[in-house]
Amino acid sequence: MQPDEQAIRELIATWLNASKAHDNATVLGLMADDAVFLQPGQQPIRGRAAFAKMQEQLAEVDIDSRADVQEIKVFGDWAYCWNHLSITVTPKNGAAVKRAGNVLTVLRKQQNRWVIARDANMLVPAD
């Protein structure tokens, strides 16, 4: 495995672990300032500040997720990663919501480390 591919896999693992721990500072540090996140039926989330605001809404839920990387391709300082993501979000006093689907992420190398530049999240309700 090439070092860039390993670094991208580590970024994904760090993201999932930080999300579960509600470590928003770590999550925000894994994305470019101008990152854009796309989700079905939702307006794009543009930039780190907008993402941080959205993260505040998740303070009272437990998050458990798993990513199965399907493909990583690196082109100099740019890369893409396709993975299948399964996520369960459980409110403190509510029923778990499960979603799963494909995610396509565009990454950019900044200051010798990979960050998320664009992310198209195609999760749908799952059993």
Image: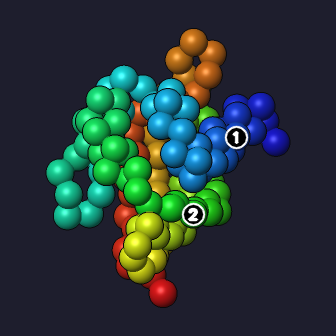
Q: Residue at x 57, y 62 (%)?
A: 65
Q: Residue at x 57, y 53 (%)?
A: 20
Q: Quadrant of the N terminus?
A: top right
Residue 61 or 1: which is nearer the viewer?
61
Residue that mark 2 sits on? 64
List the single residue furthest toward the front. 93
Callout 2: few (<14), some (14-19), or many (20+) C-alpha neighbours within 10 Å?
Answer: some
Locate residue 121 relative to residue 53 in the image: left or right: right
Count of marks, rendered view: 2
Horizontal and vertical percent position of residue 32: 42, 26
Residue 38 in view of the camera:
yes
Q: Earlier in the sequence, mark 2 or mark 1?
A: 1
The part of the image, by quadrant, that contains residue 117 is top left
Amino acid on which disc 2 is placed: Asp
In the rendered view, would you say 36 is above or below 42?
above
Does residue 5 sit above or below 48 in this rendering? Answer: below
- Viewed as shown, does residue 19 lie left or right of 125? right
In the drawing, does residue 12 fall left or right of residue 7? left
What coloring was used for the rendering? rainbow
To which residue does mark 1 refer?
10
